[in-house]
Image: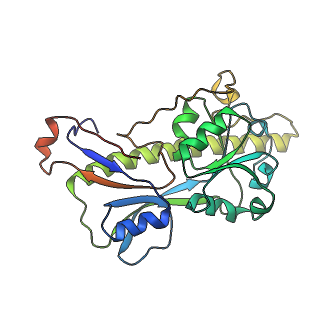
Amino acid sequence: MDSHPGLSVSVRSGNGESLLRWVAHGEVDVACCLRLPVPPGVEEERAWPQHLGVVTAPAHPLTQRNKPLRLRDCLDDPLVLVAPDMELRVRVERLDPRLVCHGRPIVETSSVPMVRRLVARGDAVAFLIPDNVAQDVAQGCLAWIGLEDPGARTHSCLYQRTGYSTAVAMGVFLEALEPAVDLVRQRFESLHQTRLQSLAMDAQGGGTQTHAAPGSPRATGAPARRGAKDSLTFDPCLLLPFPCAELPFRHSAPRSCSAWAKARSCRCFH
């Protein structure tokens, strides 16, 4: 977004149903969340594949498993879960009903940054999509393992009002957002497929080698990080990783492209 220094973006967070209601009422220009039934007055404008995965501290035992991971394999661990009214939580509970009966949530929160901090500091596990943890995995603060449960593959979608014509400023923002989302998806999918291929080769050869998850010390070559400090960063110009599982956006920028070069003003409200 540096090429458009006059562009200003306001971000609000909420669960998926709230976001689509705000779009329908014109309170926000667009909303991004996991795929939901579209209410009257709203249309799905873009969609990106997503993969639900387990998030742990880098040295957690789950990162060294030599078998594909399913949600049931995590139920003996303490859990940090997003709030029950968030679409991400609903999707996770649909994967395996045993989560509701046998899961041990120690914290439930509507704040994805809080989920990341708590998991990085202890032995708890969480369930998030790559967009939520891309930066922390790259920095070695967290590890992410894609789940193999049926239904673990989903989509995040961009919604707008039916018949809405995207403003110039919002169009510029979306042009920057889409390649960033694609880059995260491609990187995590490549790491996930590499891990599955290695597991399959070991199974055929009868080996017992363990395989590190993306972000674990073995995957990054870095020492294990336990009790990481609260030092997560967030770039509001890229909006990745998303501060929440679902986000709506409202733009506020000069309509004249030439005016964008006068002064930089990028804001993110959460």
Residue at position x 20%, y 41% in the image: 6
Image-quadrant location for residue 210: top right
Report x, y in % for residue 171: 26, 54
Q: Is residue 115 left or right of residue 185?
A: right
Residue at position x 23%, y 44% in the image: 7
Above or below: residue 208 compared with residue 69: above
Residue sticking out furthest to the bottom: 40
Above or below: residue 258 compared with residue 19: above
Residue at position x 69%, y 24% in the image: 224
Quadrant including the N terminus: top left
Residue sticking out furthest to the right: 206
Above or below: residue 267 compared with residue 229: below
Q: Is residue 268 left or right of residue 120?
A: left
Report x, y in % for residue 61: 79, 36
Image-quadrant location for residue 229: top right
Report x, y in % for residue 57: 68, 34
Above or below: residue 266 compared with residue 23: above
Q: In this view, does 257 lie to the left or right of 172?
A: left
